[in-house]
Image (cartoon, helix red, strand yellow):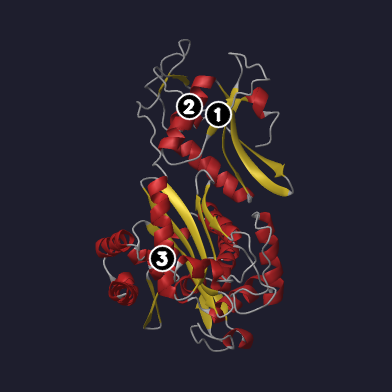
């Protein structure tokens, strides 16, 4: 009895100490604390209470996915409809990034604060009606301070009213495959009809990073200064968990403490979602525990190294003249010769015969927005320029179920060149797969 009492007292005190100190500690100290926690077996007490209380929590859900493969590594109540709270603002930012990418706005464009926006409850910047804020400051205010007044102002700027903007948010959610999500406002403030799931929020976190790589960096800002006042980012994992580069926290009474996090280690990127934390600290520790465990399970992607393919002139191509006049250009399509090329996985259906003379295609992705597809094509050509520099990209609209997607392919390659291009893309961190055109034309992947 005495030993049990001493153990219980130790666990309780350790819980309080770790919860208060862990998220303020340096990364190495935090990792030591978590390791010690796991070793002595008290993590069930530290993280959202004990295991039984986690699963008894009606607000709780969690989800971890490997971004590149789309493999679900961990899921609890992943499709349960819950309140997203300020995770809603990730969709608000997605639509704001769309306007920037489409050149309808610039980072210096001004957003006016209406009386409705100024009346929103905290968290907010306490902007007054008639004030104006730049788009870039609005982005930082949403990411760090999670400012509700700014969220409403953005919605009014983009759609005229928050109600219309919420409809646009829901339509975009469906287009991104967030089939169970409904938005009613731009901020995440309480609304009984505003619901989402852990799985859907993970999809949103992946989409905003992939579709807007030029703006995603804002989610890594640890602080934001506006009118002489500094605001710290609520996402403490940016400092507490190595590899974290975003993305957003959320809280209302009906939701508990929510978190969408993205972290990359050794070429592996995990996206995690936690709904329903009892406190912000216990939620963060729970996320750290989930990601730590899954990083242990997933092996880093390793691609066999090889010399970069060297474009050589065709035997019948005359040597390039050196006495060119100013402004003259000679363009010749190179023939690629590669030796000792390691095999790459390709799709070879058993029922379809593949000729050695077949032309091959490579596919580098499918995107919800045409502009994102064009950017992916440009990036692929730059990453595998020795092979793709002279080959036009085919950007075509395909349907995946009811979801329209813009697919990016490069056609007219031979098998060796297709494999080599994919290898170069893999080595630069891009997705790619190769397949014969006879199969590619029969599939809308």
Please tell me which of labels 3 and 2 falls first in the chain.
3
Q: Is residue 185 above or below residue 352?
A: below
Give percent across and percent down for residue 418: 52, 26
Seen at 50% across and 67% down, the residue is 52
Give percent across and percent down for residue 249: 48, 70
**Image-quadrant location for residue 30:** bottom left
**Mark 2 surroundings: few (<14), some (14-19) or many (≥20) residues within 10 A:** some
Between 40 and 145, the one lying in front of the other is 40
Residue behind mark 1: 434
Q: Is residue 240 above or below residue 391?
A: below
Q: Measure the C-alpha gap from mark 1 to mark 3.
A: 46 Å
Seen at 59% across and 68% down, the residue is 92
Q: Which is closer to the viewer, label 1 or label 3?
A: 3
Whether pointer 1 and pointer 3 mark residues with C-beta atoms closer than 8 Å, the reply is no
Q: Which is closer to the viewer, label 3 or label 2?
A: 3
Instruction: Tell me the number on the disc at residue 44.
Output: 3
Q: Which is closer to the viewer, label 1 or label 2?
A: 2
Please tell me which of labels 1 and 2 falls first in the chain.
2
Seen at 43% across and 63% down, the residue is 287
Q: Measure the C-alpha gap from mark 1 to mark 2.
A: 8 Å
Q: Which residue in the rendered view is the most extreme toward the front?
A: 1
Instruction: Tell me the number on the disc at residue 344.
Output: 2
């Amino acid at each position: 009895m005495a030993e049990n009492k001493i153990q219980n007292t130790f666990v309780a005190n350790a819980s309080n100490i770790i919860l208060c100190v862990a998220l303020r500690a340096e990364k190495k100290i935090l990792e030591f604390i978590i390791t010690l926690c796991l070793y002595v077996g008290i993590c069930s007490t530290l993280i959202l209470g004990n295991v039984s209380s986690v699963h008894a929590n009606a607000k709780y859900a969690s989800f971890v996915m490997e971004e590149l493969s789309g493999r679900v590594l961990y899921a609890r109540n992943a499709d349960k409809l819950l309140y997203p709270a300020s995770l809603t603002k990730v969709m608000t930012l997605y639509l704001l990034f769309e306007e920037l990418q489409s050149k309808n706005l610039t980072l210096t464009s001004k957003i006016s604060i209406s009386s409705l926006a100024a009346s929103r409850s905290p968290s907010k910047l306490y902007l007054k009606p008639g004030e104006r804020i730049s788009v870039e400051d609005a982005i930082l205010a949403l990411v760090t301070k999670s400012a509700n007044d700014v969220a409403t102002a953005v919605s009014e700027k983009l759609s005229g009213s928050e109600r219309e903007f919420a409809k646009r948010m829901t339509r975009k959610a469906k287009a991104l495959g967030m089939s169970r999500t409904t938005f009613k406002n731009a901020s995440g403030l309480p609304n009984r009809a505003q619901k989402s799931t852990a799985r859907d929020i993970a999809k949103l976190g992946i989409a905003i990073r992939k579709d807007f790589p030029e703006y995603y960096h804002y989610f890594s800002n640890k602080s934001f200064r506006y009118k002489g006042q500094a605001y710290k980012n609520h996402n403490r994992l940016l400092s507490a968990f190595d590899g974290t580069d975003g993305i957003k926290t959320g809280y209302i009474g009906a939701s508990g403490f929510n978190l969408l996090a993205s972290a990359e280690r050794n070429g592996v990127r995990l996206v995690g979602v936690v709904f329903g934390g009892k406190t912000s600290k216990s939620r963060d520790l729970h996320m750290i525990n989930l990601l730590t465990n899954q990083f242990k399970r997933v092996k880093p992607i390793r691609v066999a190294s090889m010399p970069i393919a060297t474009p050589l002139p065709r035997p019948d191509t005359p040597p390039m003249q050196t006495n060119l006049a100013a402004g003259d250009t000679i363009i010749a399509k190179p023939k690629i010769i590669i030796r000792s090329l390691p095999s790459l996985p390709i799709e070879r259906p058993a029922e379809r015969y593949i000729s050695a003379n077949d032309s091959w295609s490579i596919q580098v992705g499918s995107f919800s927005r045409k502009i994102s597809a064009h950017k992916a094509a440009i990036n692929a050509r730059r990453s595998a320029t020795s092979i793709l520099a002279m080959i036009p990209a085919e950007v075509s609209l395909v349907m995946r179920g009811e979801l329209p997607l813009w697919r990016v392919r490069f056609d007219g390659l031979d098998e060796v060149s297709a494999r080599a291009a994919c290898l170069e893309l893999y080595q630069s961190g891009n997705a790619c797969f190769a397949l014969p055109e006879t199969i590619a034309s029969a599939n809308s992947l």
